[in-house]
Amino acid sequence: MTPSPLRTLQIGKGWFPEDTGGLDRYYYELLDALPAAEVQTAGLVTGSCQVAAESAGRVRAFAPTRAPLATRWRGVRRSARASLRDSQVDVVAAHFALYAAPCLDLLRAAPLVVHFQGPWAAESRVEGAGTIAVEIKARIERAVYQRAQRCITLSQAFATLLAERYGVAPDRIVTVPGGINAARWASGLSRRDARDVLGWPQDRPIVLAVRRLARRMGLDQLVAAIPLLCRAVPDVLVHLAGRGSLAADLERRRHDSGLERHLRLVGYLPDELLPIAYRAADLTVVPSVALEGFGLVVAESLASGTPALVSDVGGLPEVVGGIAPQCVVPDASAASWALALADALLGRLQIPPPAALAAHVRATFDWSVVAPRITAIYREAAA
């Protein structure tokens, strides 16, 4: 007997076409995947007046993204109260503690499930936030996470962090890997054709890093590895795709180190070009040094058929562990990255063929697999 659809209120952060972070993409795609798993969704995010139109009314913006915090808090509280009053909600799912916190006292009837994608306070500390700001964020997080009936983490590494750092009981934590639409990343192009589309050179090995240009992403060590890598692979070209606070510093290092021929900062890649960029690269790299809960870019790259080298940080080893554990680089030093990249580009590292990489993603990380697991957690919390 088919269970009746579960009705959920999903409190997010931003609307993905307008805010392009990993959390926003996850939220956007999850809400698109849940109806097939018998879950009805109503969403609240920051954003423009286009949010309701683009989501056919399923998601509404409670405040502009850059509105003062007090305005955003009043907006999310007002919108959550209206949603809980006007419709039956079986589960409230929170994706960002900052916007769940003002609504906690409203959740008397509906259970709360938290999607934990990373320690917001700790990430702020790594990026240079002040002590007081970090402590306030940590207290907001702790209040939300400890209130939840269930917390969903994207990796076992972050399940451990959630229990140890925030005091959440382990029996309330469930690990479900990140989801992607695997078919979207299978461009169907050959590497040569993908490079033609992007105007990338055909005669050079290309390494691609799709990253926010921020401290914890490990880009300093990647840049430091390039001169060492050039000794083994003289024609290598590294593309850094993304934007962030380190852009000017990385461009300066590129010039000062004489790496103009081997390193390019290609800026933000539009969403429609990302599958082509993954396919065009010989290899992708995720050199994060801290607080990487999963790494959607790794699953996306594998789905395109392009292998990914990852650091031994957070949930990254869990993404490649089921198909290519040899792609984990245990040492974050520039020398280790140079050696690992050279081994991969020169064929000294045995990596499964593209079809096997893509098949692993379809079987493990596709939303058709992930969404039903999340639905089961929602139903358990609602029960």
Image (cartoon, rainbow, N blue to C red):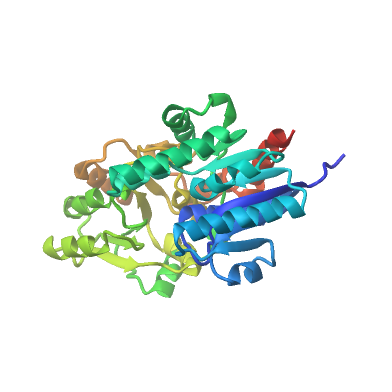
Asked whether, in this view, residue 273 is left or right of residue 259, the answer is: right
Asked whether, in this view, residue 373 is left or right of residue 5, the answer is: left
| Depicted 20 relative to depicted 382: above or below | below
Asked whether, in this view, residue 131 is left or right of residue 64, the answer is: left
- Front residue of this view, candidates 21 and 351: 21
Asked whether, in this view, residue 378 is left or right of residue 327, the answer is: right
| Depicted 25 relative to depicted 64: above or below | above
- Front residue of this view, candidates 238 and 345: 238
- Front residue of this view, candidates 101 and 201: 101
Q: Quadrant of residue 45?
A: bottom right
Q: Quadrant of residue 49?
A: bottom right
Q: Residue at x 59, y 42 (%)?
A: 104
Q: Residue at x 70, y 33 (%)?
A: 380
Counting every numbered tag in the picture gives 0
Q: Quadrant of the N terminus?
A: top right
Q: Quadrant of residue 262?
A: bottom left
| Residue 20 pos. (x, y %) | 47, 61
Q: Residue at x 57, y 34 (%)?
A: 147
| Depicted 291 relative to depicted 281: above or below | above
Q: Quadrant of the C terminus?
A: top right
| Residue 58 pos. (x, y %) | 68, 61
- Front residue of this view, candidates 343 and 103: 103
Is residue 19 at all visible to an observer of this figure?
yes
Is residue 350 at all visible to an observer of this figure?
no
Q: Residue at x 44, y 42 (%)?
A: 118
| Residue 178 pos. (x, y %) | 54, 45
| Residue 379 pos. (x, y %) | 72, 37
